[in-house]
Amino acid sequence: MTKLSNRLNRLQPSATLAMSQKSSELKALGVDIINLSIGEPDFNTPDAVKAAAHQAIDNNYSHYSPVPGYPVLRKAIIEKLKRENGLDYSESQILCSNGAKQSVCNAIMALVDDGDEVIIPAPYWVSYPQMVKLAGGEPVFVEATIEQNFKITPSQLEAAITPRTRLLILCSPSNPTGAVYNAQELEALAEVLKKHEDVIVLSDEIYEHINYIGSHASIAQVDGMKERTVIINGVSKAYAMTGWRIGFIAGPEWIVKGCNKLQGQYTSGPCSVSQIAAAEAFSGDQQCVEEMRQAFERRKNLIVELTRQIPGFEVSVPDGAFYIFPRISQFFGKQYEGSVINTSTDFAMFLLQIGHVATVGGDAFGSPNCIRLSYATSEDNIREAMKRISKTVALLK
């Protein structure tokens, strides 16, 4: 008998990883692919962080760590949250995990019961609804269109809340859109949430430092919301440390204790050497973060300019992260050599197979009229990719 669990059968594979895999397969066959599908900085980890990791190895950080992470890392996170966000936490309110992805899943699994509703603004990161389903919850999608810069309004939030609502997931800066909620917008959402005391906010802030509007705002900074907010963050994006797999939760102690209990049963503490490297990242010189942010901003300006020159692409200028999310529905119904473009996934596959540029269809992000392009690559790659896309879409009739 070859039967997988119903729990697993409810899940969909990650579309971003699937497209990256298809891109890799074509590359292995000798096809020159420009990959704009993956959400990973193309920079190397800063030298000071790597040096700290070498020292950790020499100092024999090769044993199990405490489940929530070494005190040195949790203290570095506490200092970061105080210094950069004006938020006070204790060690018992911090849990370090194997990447921010596990941190998100920990929080959802710890808070969501069968039948609970979780409000997820769409477009959304592909894994949010799948994690909610894994926990037995029901995703409730609230559409934020390109006309509203992909951000939900207080009235939309109010309309989505029911007696079964347990959680609201916010991602700012956003994957996949690059949208950023400013302090005033978060305060307006918080006013709605204050009328519904049982609703917890999961605030995914992993792209915090890749921000083009000057400052990052967290809903936990709004009066009365810190006690109801679980902040998710980590080192992957800001410090180009995706492979080091260090994320963290900062939140109310009762939630963090629950996540600690859960993590203790299925992964325990994250990699010991990575934790020491992450502590250095948070507490060391932050100039590298600003240098990478400036590079991303230059790339953002370039890709927005070039994408707007392609007929049929509608572009909202992102305020953060390293993605653009253009609307491409004008191409639906068009065809090339008998193949019709019916969906954004069709369009992304067309760009990959004919144009040799990897993107991701918006279907996977809950926005079927858009595609996601990552500009976490060189300016030369961006120029060549957009040249290819322009020539490729011109083939559609």
Image (cartoon, rainbow, N blue to C red):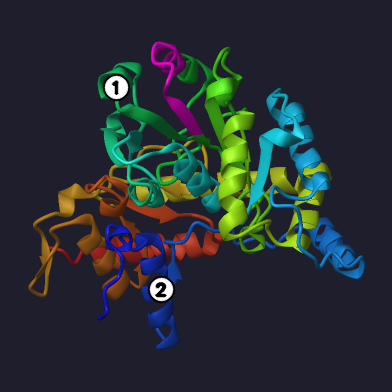
**Residue identified by numbered label 2:** 21
Q: Residue at x 37, y 43 (%)?
A: 124
Left or right relative to 276: residue 135: left
Between circles 2 and 1, the one closer to the viewer is 1
Which of the image's four quarters has the N terminus? Answer: bottom left
Q: Secondary structure at mark 2?
A: helix
Of the pair 26 and 129, the residue shown nearer to us: 129
Quadrant assignment, res 352: bottom left
Identify the residue shown where x is 77% and y is 28%: 83
- Per the rendering, the mark at residue 68 is none
Q: Is residue 226 above or below residue 116?
A: above
The answer to whether residue 208 is seen in the rendering is no
Q: Residues within 10 Å of mark 2 (few under 14, many from 20)?
A: few
Residue 37 in the image, given as x and y percentages of width and height? 42, 61
Name the residue nearer the viewer: 31 or 8: 8
Residue 270 drawn in magenta: no
Residue 283 shown left or right of residue 394 in the figure? right
Q: Is residue 189 magenta?
A: yes
Q: Which residue position is annotated with label 1?
A: 163
Q: Amino acid at mark 1?
A: Pro
What are the residue bounds of the magenta stretch?
Answer: 188-202
Q: Nearer the viewer, residue 258 or 94?
A: 258
| Alpha carbon distance from label 2 to label 1 | 41 Å
Is 212 on the left or on the right of 325, as rendered? right
- Counting residues from the start of the chain, the first of labels 2 and 1 encountered is 2
As drawn, 296 above or below 156? below
Q: Position of residue 98 (x, y in %)?
A: 61, 56
Left or right of 26, for residue 298: right
